[in-house]
Image (cartoon, rainbow, N blue to C red):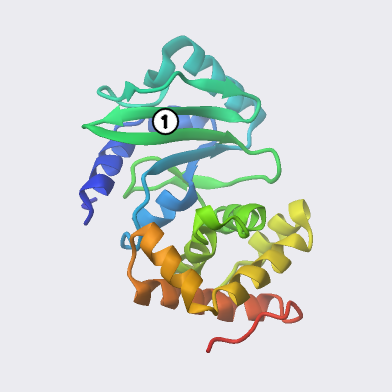
Amino acid sequence: MAYLKPEHEIIGELLAGMDAPFLAECQCYFGGGTAIVLKNNEYRRSLDVDFLCADMEGYRKLRVAFFDHGVAAVLPDGAKELRQVRTDQYGIRTFVEYQGQAIKFEIVRESRIPLSGNLDPDLGVPTLAIESMFAEKLLANADRCQDNSVAYRDAIDLGFLVLQKGEIPHVAVQTAEAAYGSLVSRSAAWVLNKLQDPDPIRYAVETLDMRLEEAKAGLAALRDAARHTWPDADIRANP
């Protein structure tokens, strides 16, 4: 799969060289913003490589493999560890250098919700199903939508998932709300109403290195879908 941005091309080559069968065996799936970006025409710059594992046995296997082999447990030859791997009950985290590019790499131990996924033929690794992508991003938005440093990226990523899918899947809403309850819809309403103001949108666009028109299109799609999903959430209509 060819990419527009050279930094994404390097991430794509890193993914293609990973141990996909072992990741699938562990039910460990590529997800997060970079996965969404790479599958949706690279609408923003994203350099983190995040995997998620909700399976207890699978996460045990991953921890043992990293203890024995370090980043070579799943990453290709040529991936150089820049920071000592940190492994605990919450995840496996490090920074690596690959083809001269520093990449934050993380496997999150997901304990809030179940996950599903399949091998993505374009990316070459097991990747979250779109319903799980939505659920994870709904939770991420609830966690940090009011954190200005994040630049509202979760709402923008959700918008591009809506453009891809056409709606917010009901099963994703059920899954996220089983973990966070009304915070899911309230956080969606908060960020969408906040982003009616042009200043936060401009800040997000500059921080995330994306085009204003694309950010607005994603947010408009999310706003329409969210108003349909949560009609009583006081989400203001698109201007």
Residue 10 placement, left or right of 88: left
How crowded is the residue under tag 1: few (<14 C-alpha within 10 Å), some, or many (20+)? few
Residue 171 falls in image quadrant: bottom right
Q: Is residue 155 left or right of residue 22?
A: right
Type of amino acid under label 1: Pro
Question: Residue 66's x, y, as percent?
Answer: 48, 17
The structure residue drawn at horizontal position 52% and vertical position 47%, both measured from the top left corner, is 117
Position of residue 163 relative to residue 153, above or below, is: below
The residue under label 1 is 21
Residue that lies at the very extreme toward the bottom in this rendered image: 239
Q: How many marks?
A: 1
Circle 1 — which element? helix
Q: Nearer the viewer, residue 21 or 65?
A: 65
Q: Position of residue 215 (x, y in %)?
A: 41, 71
User: Can the viewer see residue 166 in this picture?
Assistant: no
Q: Position of residue 218 (x, y in %)?
A: 45, 73
